[in-house]
Every structure is written in structure tokens, then in C-alpha cells.
Amino acid sequence: MTLKQVLEVFELLESPRTTGREVGRFLVSHGAAEGDVTVTAVGGVDFVTVVIPGLRGRRAGVAVADGGGDRGGGGDRGGGAPTLGVIGRLGGTGARPHVTGLVSDADGALAALAAAAKLLDLARAGDRLAGDVIVSTHICPDAPVIPHDPVPFMDCPVDEATLNTYEVSPEMDAVVSIDATKGNRVINARGFAISPTVKEGWILRVSEDLLDLMAATTGEPPRVFPVTMQDITPYGNGVFHLNSILQPACATRAPVVGVALTAVTAVPGCAGGANHETDIAEAVRFVVEVAKAYGAGRLAFYDPLELARLKSLYGDMAHLTGLGPSKRPGCRG
């Protein structure tokens, strides 16, 4: 169960006085080593990163057999189990002074930190995962609001390039990016949905392993939200983006999958009282199971042979992860 951790993080983030340091202390209270928690203040934003070491992760320094393909194993540093990145994407946890309390946009941070707390609780009880997990997000209780169609979005005091700098680690072999994705008319259901895998400018097929895990953890048919070419290009290029859920794919060659917290109606990111605890807990449970399976080499985000075939037929698409001429990085939507 993950609802307990979600409620704990909700209470923590709801306070206007909560800073990244307090979030760091919360993670330490759940069993994180102080050296595995990093808090960095940049331009009104507190970036928080926590590493949950695995039994056979790179930080363990224990060699293991190569698992082959994208299902873990291999690696030439430390242990051979792959590292999963879990990124909580958002503009801000609050929109003070315009909105009191937590806003809908906080779902990304809420879910990522709850997943970290759950994984730390498991490790403290003796259930350590095979691979390392790196969880990163940021805290900003007074982010601005900007116009967006069909509903307003939360902005961020720092630009998208800065978010990627502090939230995307080169150690991440695959990335799950969690974000509130309620301000649209293309995915209209309560709960969460996943995206196709995005890697090096390619929108690849949806991972069958992730679909299986989603069905198992929710007890319902899996939901997939549509992704366009615009969505995987960097902010600041002047084109429409659904939101920033797939912006980490612009800063890594690792495969990235979005986990979107969704709603039936279009909900502004600045809406108060719109964080649905049970929906977030369901997404967290899914992410925890992804972490278990990926580190153990039982889950693939994509088929490396199929990607190689696509590249041989149609060339490299990595140019889509960069800004065009005379463009500058933009803020989150």
C-alpha cells in the first residue's frame, strides 16, 4: 500500500513554510542516508534528489551477470543492475498568494516523493531492490500562473533547461516522469495514464511490460495518453506542448516514459483541492513496481533492436531534442 506515504507527503508539502531541507529531513526519517539526499536552492526553487541504493546497483560495487537487451544487467560501474530515475515534474507546489494550499500541479512532486518514501520504507524493512533508484523533484510554494489553452498552467521561476540540469542524472538508465496532466481534452479519465516510450527524438511503441504492470496494479485496462512530436521538443521553441511531462527526454539518451495524473474534466494546474490522494497512490504503486522489475532485469522500456532498425531506415532523430536557431529555453507550462 502507498496511501500512507502519499498522505504524509501531502501534509508535508501543504505548508507554505516547507522547504527542500525539510523534505530532505523527511526522507532521512524514512531511512535515507544523509549522504544520499541532495538539496540545492536555485532561483527560488529547491531541488531535492534522493538515491535509494540497490543490492546490485552501481553504488554497491558488486558485479553481476549481463541480463542483455534493455531488461537490465550489464553496465561497467559497480554492480550491473540498471538505475531507474523517477522525476516529479511540476511548475510549483503552490501558487501563493493567489491560491491557498497545495495546487493540482503539485501531483508530480507529491507522487515522486511518496514513491521515494515507500522505497525507503521497503529497504529499511529488509526488502532492498536490485538496482539503484534516483528520485528527483523540486519544491516551490509560490510559483506564478500563466495563460494556457484550455486552462491556465503553473509556471516556474527557473527555465526548463535548469529543471533538466538538476533533475535528470546521467546515472539514470531509464526515466519515469510523473506530472499532473489534467489541463487538456485528450485524456479524460480519473487516475493515471502512461505515454509511449520516448528516446533520442523517437516516439516508440508503448512498452508491453509497462502495460502489463499497469493492468496488474490498477486491476483495470491500462490507459495510454497521446504524444505528439511537439511534446518531445524543448520548451521555448514556440510550439504547443501538452505539458512538460516529457521534457526530461530532451536531456538524456535514456528511454523516458511519462506517468500522467489525469482527470475527466480540464483542471487548471493552479486549482486548489484537486490532488486526488487515491489516484496518486495508485500511480505511486505502479512506479514502485516498475522500480522493482526494472532493477531486477524483468522489464524493458523499449526494444533496442527495433530502435536500431528505425535508425538504419530513417536516420537519427536526436536533433528534435534541441532548440532551433535563435531560440532560448522557456519555462514550464
Image (cartoon, rainbow, N blue to C red):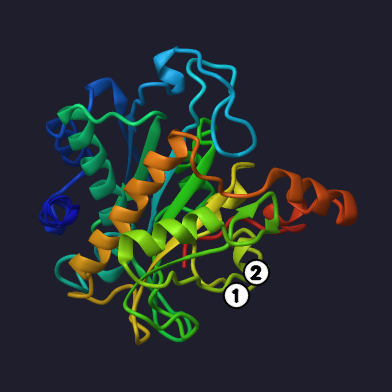
Above or below, 300 against 329 in this view is above
User: What residue would you read off at disc 1?
Assistant: 240
Q: Residue at x 86, y 52 (%)?
A: 315
- Say which of 283 and 67 sits in front: 67
Q: Residue at x 12, y 57 (%)?
A: 7
Above or below, 125 against 47 in this view is above
Locate residue 104 relative to residue 182 in the image: left or right: left
Locate residue 155 relative to residue 285 in the image: left or right: right
Q: Residue at x 35, y 87 (%)?
A: 265
Q: Tell me the crowding category of disc 2: few under 14, some 14 to 19, or many 20 or more residues within 10 angstroms, Cα based.
A: some
From where the camera sits, is residue 327 visible?
yes
Q: Tell me the crowding category of disc 1: few under 14, some 14 to 19, or many 20 or more residues within 10 angstroms, Cα based.
A: some
Residue 125: give x, y in percent of width and height: 15, 30
Q: Residue at x 41, y 71 (%)?
A: 181
- Say which of 292 and 279 sits in front: 292
Q: Secondary structure at mark 2?
A: helix
Q: Residue furthest right?
A: 313
Q: How many marks?
A: 2
Above or below, 321 against 58 in this view is below
Residue 263: give x, y in percent of width and height: 34, 79
Residue 40: give x, y in percent of width and height: 34, 35
Image quadrant in which you'd find residue 286: bottom left
Image quadrant in which you'd find residue 254: top right
- Say which of 15 and 321 sits in front: 321
Residue 306: give x, y in percent of width and height: 75, 51
Q: Nearer the viewer, mark 1 or mark 2?
A: 2
Mark 1 touching mark 2, by CB under 8 A?
yes
Precedes in sequence: disc 1 or disc 2: 2
User: What residue would you read off at disc 2?
Assistant: 230
Q: Secondary structure at mark 1?
A: loop
Locate residue 75 relative to residue 177 in the image: left or right: right
> Which amino acid lies under the numbered mark 1 shown in the image of this protein?
Phe
